[in-house]
């Protein structure tokens, strides 16, 4: 205890030296430890979500883009897959097929248009309100609600993709009808809407006044039988309400309505394998196992980790050498003190302990700081990781 | 009276330095106040290092309070030194990162043989009171005057209640007035505790205060050329 006290007093008397040494050692411990745990967490999180999604159907192209768009709602430039593929999967009896459209954003957050099956499949439940039940409804991921300060009953505008092109649909005012309970996944950071709402955002569905009764005759360009051509100057509804919900409709072939991906939860491994083989054989679209894609992606992550590990190794070696230099210089500076202790009768072991305990104390404090840093990183960095994927 | 230090047929030499010390016979009685004088290089510091067990003679015998230093291990010599000998150095050798009180208590913090308890702390404060430094006990050495540092060093030497107090030119770094006061304190405190006093000094003006004076030129039968070698 006495030696610990002396070591503590010495460390306190030289605060700069102690702080620099502690910081260097803490950083040396923190870097590899944080990398290890973050990669482990990242790997576990990626694998867990991928394993929860047996199959993804989508357009041919970059398989990472398709997987990351379907699992993490990452924006991608992939061509959409038509709604008819979903209908075909449903008709094939493969199991559960869930549509996903992740081509839009609202205040910078991904708008995920999907069916109610998605929430059941992902184990999502509303902590307030409900999941979206009607077009124009939005249910927010827990983090989105928290960050935007939006609650049930508020509204949220979708982000307009083309600000200066009036032929594109305007921003849609979404009614917030629920907030999901936090799950610690990408679902926390999304705005969920019904699949049909995405088609309004696409401009493939819209609502407006009755052209026979409610529209200004000056906007009618032509009447031919049942068809009425109306000027683009006619304003469409930019909000779905009880009063106008009945006016929303599609033009064209609904089987061609676009989806970003289809999540497939096969009834059995066999039906899944058959459905995958059939779709991939047709070569128009593809079906992939996200677990395999994520395993390949993790290969890249591990290569990055190996690089960081080697970097941490160099840092550790540098710090150890610098620390050794500091200790040697410190011991030299303390030569007078060591001689005094020797002359008054202190044992050699006591002198050794005096030096060793101070280093030990600095090591322990460094380790505690590094552990706190790793814990903080594991809490804070997953957000960053989710943004990275 | 009994001898606290007995030296017989002692021979010591630093390796390669050319200096040697030979003491045929020396005895210092308990309670004596002995001054050790002589020009630089005659072995004054070497002698007190040998008596304290810091150095070990090549031949001969040193007995400290009945214990033959040659016959015990280095660890035992250190234990004997920290508990039975109080040492005051010319440069005081206080630890800069400890305050006055902790410097006084230092022997108790670096030895397992000595137990630091309330009684010892009280004794340290009593010594500080007696030497007039109680008000600076919380200060580090850099905030003490030379005289105050010297008194802290004296308190450190006395706090273990040693049988022998060895002072190596304790007033060498002090002005004459402070040196006189310091000497008064050393004598007073050593006497109050019944300790034997052995002091190396160059100041011949204070020799009449000692009961005995050892002149190294006469004691060291091996000395060949005063001023030669590294020993003081």
Image (spheres, coloured by chain):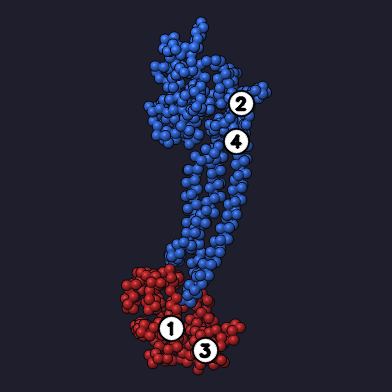
Dot 4, how many residues are within 10 Å of its Cα: few (below 14), some (14-19), or many (20+)?
Answer: many
Dot 3, how many residues are within 10 Å of its Cα: few (below 14), some (14-19), or many (20+)?
Answer: many
Which residue does the numbered mark 3 point to in the structure image?
Answer: B42
Task: Tell us which disc is closer to us: 3 or 2.
Answer: 2
Where residue A343 sits in the image (x, y, percent)?
A: 48, 77
Who's the residue at 50% across and 43% down the image?
A381
| B222 lies above or below A20 | below
| A200 lies above or below B53 | above
Q: Quadrant of residue A289?
A: top right
Residue closer to the observer: A189 or B217: A189
Provide the secondary structure element on which disc 2 rests.
Answer: strand
Which residue does the numbered mark 1 point to in the structure image?
Answer: B172
Judging from the image, mark 2 belongs to the subunit labelled A
3D distance between C-alphas at marks 4 and 1? 79 Å
Provide the secondary structure element on which disc 3 rests.
Answer: loop
Position of the N terminus of chain B, as image quadrant, is: bottom left
**Nearer the N terminus, badge 4 or badge 2?**
2
Where residue A236 sits in the image (x, y, percent)?
A: 45, 19
Task: Tell us which disc is closer to us: 3 or 1.
Answer: 1
Where residue A355 sits in the image (x, y, percent)?
A: 50, 66
3D distance between C-alphas at marks 4 and 2? 18 Å
User: Would residue A285 appear left or right of A233 to someone viewing this image?
Assistant: right
3D distance between C-alphas at marks 2 and 1? 94 Å
Which residue does the numbered mark 2 point to in the structure image?
Answer: A59
3D distance between C-alphas at marks 3 and 1? 18 Å
Which residue does the numbered mark 4 point to in the structure image?
Answer: A294
């Amino acid at each position: 205890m006495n030696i610990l006290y002396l070591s503590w007093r010495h460390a306190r008397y030289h605060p700069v030296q102690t702080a620099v040494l502690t910081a260097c050692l803490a950083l040396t411990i923190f870097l590899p430890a944080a990398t290890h745990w973050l990669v482990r967490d990242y790997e576990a999180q990626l694998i867990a979500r991928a394993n929860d999604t047996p199959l993804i159907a989508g357009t041919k192209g970059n398989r990472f883009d398709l997987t990351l768009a379907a699992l993490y709602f990452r924006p991608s430039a992939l061509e959409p897959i038509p709604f008819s593929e979903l209908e075909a999967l449903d008709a094939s009896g493969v199991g559960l097929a869930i549509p996903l459209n992740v081509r839009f954003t609202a205040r910078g957050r991904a708008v995920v248009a999907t069916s109610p099956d998605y929430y059941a499949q992902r184990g999502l439940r509303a902590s307030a309100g409900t999941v979206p039940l009607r077009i124009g409804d939005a249910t927010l991921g827990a983090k989105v609600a928290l960050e935007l300060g939006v609650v049930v009953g508020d509204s949220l505008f979708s982000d307009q993709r083309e600000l200066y092109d009036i032929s594109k649909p305007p921003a849609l005012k979404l009614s917030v009808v629920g907030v999901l309970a936090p799950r610690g996944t990408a679902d926390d950071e999304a705005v969920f809407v019904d699949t049909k709402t995405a088609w309004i955002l696409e401009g493939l569905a819209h609502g407006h006044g009755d052209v026979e009764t409610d529209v200004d005759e000056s906007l009618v360009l032509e009447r031919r039988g049942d068809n009425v051509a109306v000027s683009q100057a006619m304003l469409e509804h930019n909000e779905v309400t009880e009063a106008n919900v009945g006016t929303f409709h599609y033009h064209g072939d609904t089987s061609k309505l676009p989806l970003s991906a289809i999540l497939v939860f096969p009834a059995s491994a066999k039906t899944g394998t058959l459905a995958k083989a059939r779709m991939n054989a047709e070569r128009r679209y593809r079906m992939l196992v996200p677990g395999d894609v994520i395993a390949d992606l993790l290969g890249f992550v591990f290569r990055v980790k190996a690089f960081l590990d080697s970097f941490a190794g160099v840092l550790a070696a540098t710090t150890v050498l610098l620390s050794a230099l500091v200790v040697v210089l410190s011991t030299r500076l303390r030569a007078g003190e060591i001689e005094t202790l020797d002359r008054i009768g202190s044992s050699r072991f006591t002198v050794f302990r005096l030096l060793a305990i101070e280093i030990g104390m600095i090591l322990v404090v460094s380790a505690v700081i590094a552990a706190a840093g790793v814990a903080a990183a594991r809490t804070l960095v997953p957000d960053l990781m989710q943004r990275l994927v | 009276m009994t001898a606290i230090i007995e030296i017989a047929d002692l021979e010591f030499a630093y390796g390669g330095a050319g200096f040697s010390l030979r003491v045929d016979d020396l005895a210092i009685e308990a309670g004596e106040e002995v001054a050790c004088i002589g020009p630089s290089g005659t072995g004054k510091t070497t002698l007190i290092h040998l008596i304290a067990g810091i150095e070990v003679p090549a031949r001969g015998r040193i007995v400290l309070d009945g214990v033959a230093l040659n016959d015990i291990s280095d660890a035992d010599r250190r234990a004997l030194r920290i508990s039975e000998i109080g040492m005051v150095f010319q440069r005081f050798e206080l630890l800069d990162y400890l305050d006055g009180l902790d410097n006084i208590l230092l022997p108790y913090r670096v030895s397992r043989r000595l137990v630091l308890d309330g009684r010892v702390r009280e004794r340290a404060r009593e010594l500080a009171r007696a030497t007039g430094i109680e008000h600076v006990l919380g200060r580090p050495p850099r905030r003490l005057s030379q005289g105050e540092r010297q008194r802290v060093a004296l308190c450190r030497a006395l706090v273990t209640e040693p049988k022998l107090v060895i002072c190596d030119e304790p007033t060498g770094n002090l002005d004459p007035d402070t040196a006189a006061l310091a000497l008064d304190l050393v004598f007073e405190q050593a006497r109050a505790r019944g300790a034997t006093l052995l002091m190396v000094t160059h100041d011949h003006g204070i020799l009449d205060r000692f009961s005995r004076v050892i002149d190294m030129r006469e004691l060291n039968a091996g000395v060949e050329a005063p001023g030669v070698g590294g020993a003081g």
